Image (cartoon, rainbow, N blue to C red):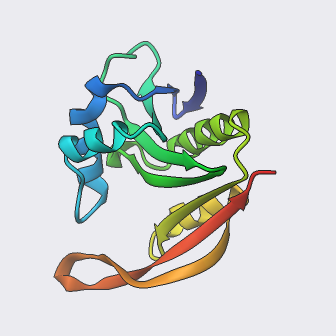
């Protein structure tokens, strides 16, 4: 599966995540989360058969470090985004959308019925992306995310029907 995006004179492609990507993915996750996942934690998730993922890389640099990734899980017709991260320097270029499109295409091929995710209510760009992709809020987890200075925010639980 290969998708591409041209953004600010750089073209990105999405490919399936590979075990050799894990160290770079842990570094990307650290850029975006107060409690980042290690490459060991990512590997443990990928060892679970229903877990799959994609990475975004610059065209012509397929073996270069990924600039974004997404992990998802599909079981019994329902899927969930486990995590998604984009390098700080590449945010705003449409990479998150490209990664989500790859997940949605994969889930369509698998005949999944619904996709769920949780997003920090303060992450306005992500919330806007998910709403543009057809997700709707179906729940809220108060004080779910921990930020600097021990500030907390809620997670919005969002759902998109796929059928």
Q: Nearer the viewer, residue 58 or 101?
A: 101
Taking the view exactly as shown, the residue that stands out farthest to the front is 76
Q: Is residue 68 above or below residue 65?
A: below
Q: Residue at x 49, y 46 (%)?
A: 72
Q: Is residue 63 above or below residue 98?
A: above
Answer left or right for 27 relative to 152.
Answer: left
Residue 159 at x, y percent in the picture: 65, 65
Q: Is residue 109 above or below residue 39?
A: above
Q: If the image is split into quadrants, where does the N terminus sit? A: top right
Answer left or right for 140 relative to 83.
Answer: right
Q: Nearer the viewer, residue 21 or 11?
A: 21
Q: Residue at x 33, y 16 (%)?
A: 63
Residue 129 at x, y percent in the picture: 61, 58
Residue 60 at x, y percent in the picture: 43, 12
Q: Residue at x 58, y 29 (%)?
A: 6
Residue 89 at x, y percent in the picture: 34, 44
Q: Residue at x 33, y 44 (%)?
A: 45
């Amino acid at each position: 599966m290969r998708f591409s995006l041209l953004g600010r004179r750089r073209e990105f492609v999405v490919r399936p995540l590979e075990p050799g990507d894990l160290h770079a993915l842990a570094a990307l996750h650290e850029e975006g989360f107060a409690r980042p996942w290690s490459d060991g934690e990512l590997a443990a998730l990928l060892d679970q058969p229903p877990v799959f993922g994609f990475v975004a890389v610059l065209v012509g640099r397929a073996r270069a470090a990924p600039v974004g990734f997404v992990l998802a899980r599909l079981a019994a017709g329902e899927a969930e985004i486990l995590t998604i991260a984009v390098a700080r320097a590449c945010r705003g270029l449409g990479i998150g959308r490209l990664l989500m499109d790859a997940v949605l295409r994969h889930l369509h091929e698998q005949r999944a019925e619904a996709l769920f995710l949780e997003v920090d209510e303060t992450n306005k760009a992500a919330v806007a992306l998910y709403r543009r992709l057809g997700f709707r809020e179906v729940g809220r987890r108060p004080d779910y995310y921990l930020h600097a200075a021990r500030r907390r925010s809620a997670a919005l639980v969002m759902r998109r029907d796929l059928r």
